[in-house]
Image (tube, helix red, strand yellow):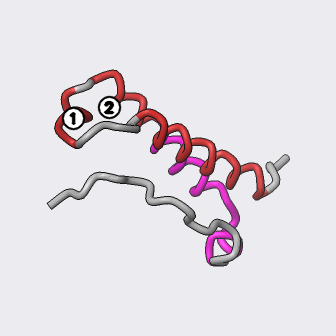
Amino acid sequence: MHRDARAYLWDVQEAAEAIKKFIAGMDFETYSQNEVVHAAVERKFGIIGEALSNCPRPILNSRVAYPMSMPLWPFAIS
């Protein structure tokens, strides 16, 4: 039995919101030196990847399905 595509998109949204909370107020240097936060962010990116890999392709190809209302990575990496 397959999950509804909305459930996968909900997983993506929840993981992205968690990442945003984990790194709130951090600059890149602080983030990169904090192993706990770094591991938590990596785990959430894993959840995002897993959810997107299981989401039906027609949903992923639809820009309406998952509007990006926030940047996923707030650090300016040069």
Q: Residue 60: where, in percent of width, then height?
A: 63, 70
Labelled disc at residue 75: none
Label 1: state its secondary structure: helix
Q: Residue 21: where, in percent of width, then height?
A: 48, 36
Judge whether 31 appears above or below 6 on screen. Answer: above
Residue toward you, 48 or 17: 17
Judge whether 9 appears above or below 24 on screen. Answer: below
- Residue at the spot x=56%, y=47% of the render? 50
Q: Are marks 1 and 2 in contact (CB under 8 Å)?
A: yes
Mark 1 and mark 2: Cα distance apart in space: 7 Å
Q: Residue furthest top?
A: 36
Q: Residue 45: where, in percent of width, then height?
A: 45, 44
> Quick check: 73 left or right of 7?
left
Residue range of the region highlighted in magenta in the rendering:
44-61
- Quadrant where the C terminus is found in the figure: bottom left
Labelled disc at residue 38: 2
Residue toward you, 54 or 14: 14
Dot 2 alpha-carbon crowd within 10 angstroms: few under 14, some 14 to 19, many 20 or more: some
Labelled disc at residue 32: 1
- Residue at the spot x=51%, y=59% of the render? 70
